[in-house]
Image (cartoon, rainbow, N blue to C red):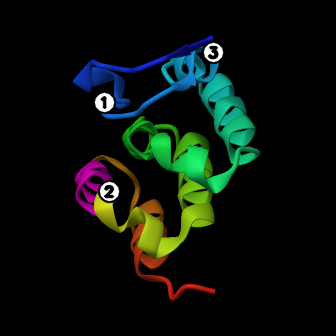
């Protein structure tokens, strides 16, 4: 099943044709479920991953360090050029996360392309 997200609070605004089941998992409250959703998302193609960047960025501020690290690792898969258009929304979440995660996000955003 596919849908187009339309609510700003979902973190999925502007995405087109995303998996409803995966989008729902990214809204879970359970950190283990969020980490599992991020792992599932990591298996997707880069073009599809880019659709989820706003939702993944919101997970940087959930308060659970394992979720934050999983989100950072997913963002790292995209590299700085693909993340550039989402940099502001990603950086907006950093105030609410631990300093080690903040440093890693900044590294990911500024890492040279391979």
Residue under label 2, please give it. 86
Front position in the image: 67 or 26: 26
Disc on res. 21:
3
Start-end of magenta stretch: 86-95
Residue sitting farthest toward the top: 1
Quadrant in which the N terminus appears: top right
Q: Does residue 8 belong to the magenta stretch?
A: no
Residue 22 picture location, percent across and down: 62, 23
Residue at 62% over, 49% down: 70
Disc on res. 101:
none
Quadrant in which the C terminus appears: bottom right
Disc on res. 13:
1
Query: As drawn, is 7 to the left or to the right of 41?
Result: left
Residue at 47% over, 42% down: 51
Question: Please, is residue 37 above or below residue 19 in the view?
Answer: below
SS class, disc 3: helix
SS class, disc 2: helix
Front position in the image: 95 or 105: 105
**CA gap, disc 3 and disc 2:** 23 Å
Query: As drawn, is 3 to the left or to the right of 7?
Result: right
Task: Name the quadrant containing residue 109.
Answer: bottom left
């Amino acid at each position: 099943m596919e849908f187009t997200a339309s609510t700003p609070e979902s973190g999925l605004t502007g995405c087109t044709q995303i998996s409803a089941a995966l989008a729902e998992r990214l809204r879970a409250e359970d950190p283990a479920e969020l980490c599992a959703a991020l792992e599932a998302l990591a298996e997707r193609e880069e073009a599809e991953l880019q659709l989820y960047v706003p939702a993944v960025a919101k997970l940087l501020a959930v308060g659970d360090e394992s979720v934050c690290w999983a989100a950072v690792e997913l963002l790292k898969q995209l590299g700085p050029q693909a993340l550039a258009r989402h940099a502001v929304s990603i950086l907006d979440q950093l105030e609410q996360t631990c300093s080690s995660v903040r440093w890693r996000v900044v590294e990911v955003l500024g890492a040279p392309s391979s």
